[in-house]
Image (spheres, helix red, strand yellow):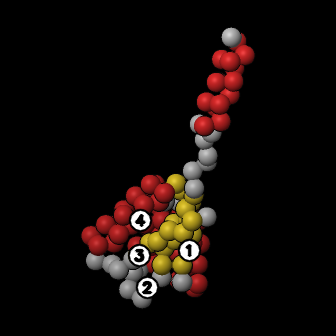
Amino acid sequence: MARVDTEIENEYEEEWELEEPKLYKVLLLNDDYTSMDFVVMVLMEIFHQSAGKANSIMFKIHEEGSGLCGVYTYEVAETKIAQVHNLAKEHQFPLRATMEEE
């Protein structure tokens, strides 16, 4: 009887193997109207970047068209993007964020 229980337990464990959640890169996109100071503020407040790192990312966005803000699960990335868009709208900037699967 113990053998049957072990087989059932092994079968059950195989069915419930957990996978790591997919991760998504959140990117800020360059535009001609959003101030550099505002981008730095967004990076510090929403993405919890240090002032130095936020400035570095801001210059990358300015020079290359986009910059990586962080890597998150889908739901967190989606929330961060919504926060960026809401804050940008509140300050009347067209700043956009997007995400890509890592």
Marks 4 & 2, CB-CB < 8 Å contact: no
Q: Gap between marks 4 and 2, in whole Å?
A: 16 Å
Residue 45: quadrant of the picture = bottom left
Q: Gap between marks 3 and 4, in whole Å?
A: 8 Å
- From the top left corner, tell me how far across and down residue 69 is, in percent: 54, 66
Marks 1 & 4, CB-CB < 8 Å contact: no
Residue on which disc 4 sits? 81
The quadrant of the image that shows the C terminus is bottom right
Q: Which amino acid does label 2 sit on?
A: Asp
Q: Report the disc number at residue 67.
A: 1
Q: Which amino acid does label 3 sit on?
A: Arg
- From the top left corner, tell me how far across and down residue 88 is, in percent: 33, 72
Badge 1 marks a residue whose secondary structure is: strand
Left or right placement of residue 40 versus residue 92 in this view: right
Residue on which disc 3 sits? 96
Q: Residue at x 43, y 85 (%)?
A: 31
Q: Gap between marks 1 and 2, in whole Å?
A: 12 Å
Residue on which disc 2 sits? 31
Sequence-wise first label, 1 or 2: 2
Q: Which amino acid does label 4 sit on?
A: Ile
- From the top left corner, tell me how far across and down residue 12 is, in percent: 61, 30
* Disc 1 residue crowd, few under 14, some 14–19, many 20+, Cα 10 Å: many
Sequence-wise first label, 3 or 2: 2
